[in-house]
């Protein structure tokens, strides 16, 4: 299982590259849509880049359940 | 035992002429915002669309197809009597049968050419070019007219937020005929019916017919007429990444690299899909990218030829150069090929 801090740091870089959101703002309790203002298309780009970076598969139907950064980190940690 | 005759094969085919028809009504983002809660800035940022062209109530898909077909015939300089096939891709011809193609063939004077419609949505034009290439090379037709035409405005609900605001009307047509050199590379095509629901109609016409309208009357704001919807994020992921693989395969099978291309003409679904495809395919800066969507919106089967025509008008030097074209959409279905631009 990958270290969750490493996953959070890696995910923050991906979010920053796609949206320009500061990496320090990408925190576990933050909602992708409500807090970070990430739209559904950017979210898909983040998901695809996360799959590549962490070597995991995140199905389309699962993306809808990943509302917070913490939920995404947990999913990646459990899938890797 | 008698040996059957077969027609002589042609080694190569190419696109001989490309025509288009753009309807007159320009729908702005501000117009759209009268129907849905949005803004010009939001729509531009999310989709890259500023306007879309739509046909008025007096103009049919047939009218658009006739105009584009006549334009293509004239540009190709192929006499009508030498057109042996007419393939029309459309999802907005309002008759299950007879086909739009049969009447189109009559209207433009190419009867008795074989004529049929195909249902391959936004991939339909590239499906048609692939079929025309095969028919010409197999000797089944001397020249084939391929038309992508849509009057999608007849099949949308302006108050719906997933797809309607993206869509426009239009038509594009090409004449495909024999060639001394390869003008159409191998078509890479396919389908993924596991995603059949991803872009679909709200309901079928049978549901309209079979409903008990006495006990179950029309509800307020309910749309009885079936209209289009999509699961945008799922479609985006499939289009922006899976289709890049298909496009790359079309390059590989044609034996060309991205460096060899003059133009990239993807289906005009969403500017962000186009941008991601360009990025994933690592297209060099010299490759001109079709971005007709900004003004024309997403016109499904018409979008690739409309974008190609615009590129040729704005960059005449692209004539004779290689273009990678790819269509993808409801089904889900896809097709890509490298062509020599006429």
Image: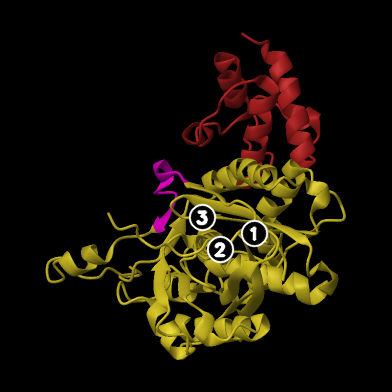
Q: Which chain does the red colour mark?
A: A
Picture layout, residue A51 above or below residue B341: above
The disc, 1 or 2, on the residue closer to the chain's N-terminal end is: 2
Q: Is residue B66 visible?
A: no
Task: Indicate the chain on which mark 1 is placed.
Answer: B
Residue identified by numbered label 2: B129
What residue is pinned by disc 3? B329
The picture quadrant where one finds residue A33 is top right
Q: Residues within 10 Å of mark 2 (few under 14, many from 20)?
A: many
Question: What residue do we see at 51% from left, 81% from top?
Answer: B65
**Distance in Å between CA atoms under marks 1 and 2:** 8 Å
- The residue most toward the front is B1
Share a chain, discs 3 and 1? yes
Which dot, 3 or 1, sits closer to the camera?
1
Left or right of A9? Residue B19 is: left
Q: Is residue B152 visible?
A: yes
Q: x%, y% of residue B175?
A: 59, 74
Q: Chain of mark 3?
A: B
Q: Which residues are magenta?
A: B191-200
Residue A55 is labelled as: none
The residue that label 1 is drawn on is B184
Q: B294 left or right of B143?
A: right
Per the image, label 3 sits on a secondary structure element best described as: strand
**SS at badge 1:** loop
């Amino acid at each position: 299982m990958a270290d969750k801090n490493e996953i959070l740091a890696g995910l923050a870089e991906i979010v920053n590259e796609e949206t320009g959101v500061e990496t320090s703002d990408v925190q576990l309790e933050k909602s992708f849509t409500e807090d970070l203002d990430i739209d559904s298309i950017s979210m898909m780009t983040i998901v695809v880049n996360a799959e590549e970076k962490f070597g995991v598969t995140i199905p389309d139907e699962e993306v809808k359940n990943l509302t917070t950064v913490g939920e995404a980190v947990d999913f990646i940690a459990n899938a890797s | 035992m008698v040996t059957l005759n077969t027609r002589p094969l042609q080694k190569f085919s190419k696109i001989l002429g490309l025509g288009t028809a753009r309807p007159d009504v320009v729908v702005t983002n501000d117009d759209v915002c009268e129907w849905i809660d949005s803004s010009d800035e939001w729509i531009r940022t999310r989709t890259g669309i500023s306007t879309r062209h739509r046909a008025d109530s007096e103009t049919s898909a047939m009218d658009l197809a006739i105009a584009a077909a006549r334009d293509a015939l004239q540009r190709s300089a192929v006499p009508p009597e030498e057109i042996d096939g007419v393939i029309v891709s459309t999802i907005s011809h309002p008759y299950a049968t007879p086909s739009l193609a049969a009447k189109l063939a009559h209207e433009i004077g190419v009867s008795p050419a074989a004529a049929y419609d195909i249902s391959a949505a936004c991939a339909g034009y590239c499906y048609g070019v692939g079929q025309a290439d095969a028919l010409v090379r197999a000797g089944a037709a001397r020249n084939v007219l391929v038309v992508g035409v849509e009057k999608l405005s007849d099949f949308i609900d302006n108050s719906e937020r997933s797809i309607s605001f993206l869509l426009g009307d239009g038509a594009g047509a090409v004449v495909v005929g024999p060639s001394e050199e390869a003008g159409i590379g191998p078509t890479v095509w396919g389908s993924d019916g596991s995603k059949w629901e991803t872009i679909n109609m709200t309901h079928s016409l049978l549901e309209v017919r079979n409903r008990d309208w006495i006990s179950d009357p029309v509800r307020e704001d309910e749309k009885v007429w079936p209209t289009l919807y999509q699961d945008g994020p799922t479609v985006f992921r499939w289009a922006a990444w899976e289709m890049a693989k298909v496009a790359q395969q079309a390059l590989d099978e044609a034996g060309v690299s991205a460096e060899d291309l003059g133009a990239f003409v993807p289906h005009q679904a969403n500017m962000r899909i186009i941008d991601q495809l360009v990025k994933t395919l690592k297209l060099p800066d010299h490759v001109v990218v079709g971005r007709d969507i900004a003004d024309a919106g997403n016109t499904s089967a018409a979008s690739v030829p409309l974008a190609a025509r615009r590129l040729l008008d704005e960059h005449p030097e692209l004539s004779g150069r290689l273009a990678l074209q790819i269509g993808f959409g409801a089904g889900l279905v896809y097709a890509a090929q490298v062509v020599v631009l006429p």
